Amino acid sequence: MGICYVTFPFFLFAKLGFINGVYNHYIPLGFLILLWTNDTGAYLAGRSFGKHKLFERISPKKTWEGFFGGFILAIVVAVNLEKYFGSLPLWQWIIVAMIISIVGTLGDLVESMLKRSLHVKDSGSILPGHGGFLDRFDGLLLAAPIVYIFLILIS
């Protein structure tokens, strides 16, 4: 199950580059920028304004303020992606940002839940201080399939 949990989303993430029939690196690159922007915005807003816990039992440091901070920053960045990358219309970049923010946060929580159930703090030691390699891509694992389906359905 673990192999499918990781490989299928990365497969669909790679297919994002071929949404319009020819390879376009801006879509997967934009996806990663939005994913990491959401994480960064959530971290900064949560540290600065966080008072209301999102799911304390699963991830005690995540807050609603952080969630909305990441959500807003991802949408701001989506507007800029449309301006500099093109590739998708503005409304599609914004919806992709919204999907990544919502579903990516769920992916983050799922990975936190898995780590808690296994009684481990980090998913690896390759990236010290970052919770492991999987922690950099946990949002991708759930968001990539949803973004791919969305983009396929509207094209």
Image (cartoon, grey):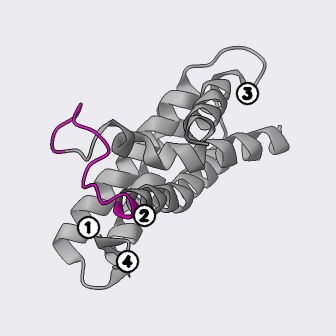
- What residue would you read off at disc 4? 64
Q: CA distance from mark 3 to mark 1?
A: 33 Å
- The spot of residue 84 in percent (x, y) is 47, 30
| Residue 45, numbered circle | 1
Q: Give whichever of 34, 82 is nearer the camera.
A: 34
Looking at the rendering, the stretch of residues picked out in magenta corresponds to 116-129
Q: CA distance from mark 4 to mark 3?
A: 33 Å
> In the rendered picture of this protein, how many numbered marks are placed on residues?
4
Q: CA distance from mark 4 to mark 2?
A: 18 Å
State the residue at coordinates (32%, 45%).
123
Callout 4: helix, strand or loop?
helix
The amino acid type, in three-letter code, at marker 3 is: Ile
Q: Give whichever of 121, 92 is nearer the camera.
A: 121
User: Which mark is first along the chain, 3 or 4?
Assistant: 3
Mark 2 neighbour class, 10 Å CA radius: few under 14, some 14 to 19, many 20 or more: some
- Residue 127 is covered by the magenta coloring: yes
Mark 4 neighbour class, 10 Å CA radius: few under 14, some 14 to 19, many 20 or more: some
The amino acid type, in three-letter code, at marker 1 is: Ala
- The spot of residue 5 in percent (x, y) is 59, 42
The amino acid type, in three-letter code, at marker 2 is: Met
Residue 85 appears in view: no
| Above or below: residue 53 compared with residue 150 | below
- Residue 86 is covered by the magenta coloring: no
| Above or below: residue 111 compared with residue 153 | below
Mark 1 neighbour class, 10 Å CA radius: few under 14, some 14 to 19, many 20 or more: some
Q: Quadrant of residue 73?
A: bottom left
Q: Quadrant of residue 112?
A: bottom left
| Residue 19, numbered circle | 3
Q: CA distance from mark 3 to mark 2?
A: 32 Å
Callout 1: helix, strand or loop?
helix
